[in-house]
Image (spheres, rainbow, N blue to C red):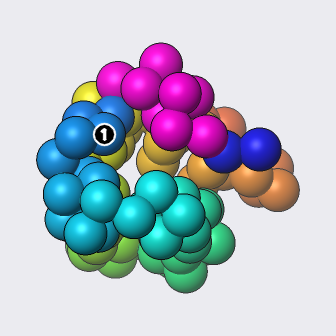
Amino acid sequence: MLTIEKLKEYGADIEKGLNLCMNNEDFYLRMVSMILSEASFDDLSRALEADDLDGAFKAAHALKGVSGNLSLTGQRRRWITANCYRGSSMKKRSFRI
């Protein structure tokens, strides 16, 4: 279960994120949870599998923006790396966002 405490452990800027969500913890947690189902994760995985670097860049940029909007600044790269390969048989590749 996603909690404010767990997000703090991951390095999220909780104060800023909550401020953006009118200090409503439930709303903030729902918004963060929605990132995990963001279509851009699948887009990024498909683009990398197809060696489509332009598509991978666009998907990674979208994920960077979504995570930044919720003040998940400390974990953008980790969230993307951890989630874009779920269910994928391809080898991980290094890329910077």
Looking at the rendering, the stretch of residues picked out in magenta corresponds to: 3-11
- Looking at the image, is 3 positioned above or below residue 49? above
Give me the residue at 53% from left, 27% from top.
5
Q: Is residue 7 rendered to the left or right of residue 67?
A: right
- Which residue is at 66% across, 45% downward? 2
The answer to whether one can see residue 68 in this image is no
Check the image and name the residue furthest to the front: 23
* Residue at x-position 27% and y-position 30%: 74
> Which residue type carries mark 1?
Ile
Number of on-image labels: 1
- Secondary structure mostly seen in magenta is helix
Magenta stretch contains residue 8: yes
Task: State the SS at label 1.
Answer: helix
Q: Is residue 19 visible?
A: yes
Q: Quadrant of the C terminus?
A: top left
Residue 52 in percent (x, y) is at: 39, 70
Query: Mark 1 highlights which residue?
Result: 14
Say left or right for 3 vs 12: right
In the orientation shown, which residue stands out farthest toward the top?
9
75 to 83, vertically: above or below: above
Q: Quadrant of residue 34?
A: bottom right
Where residue 19 appears, as percent x and y from the top left, is 19, 57
For residue 31, above or below residue 12 = below
36 drawn magenta = no
Q: x and y percent of residue 38 in the render?
A: 53, 75
Quadrant for the N terminus in the image: top right
Q: Position of residue 54 (x, y in %)?
A: 25, 72
Q: Residue at x 47, y 70 (%)?
A: 27
Local crowd size for mark 1, using a 10 Å CA cut-off: few (<14), some (14–19), many (≥20): some
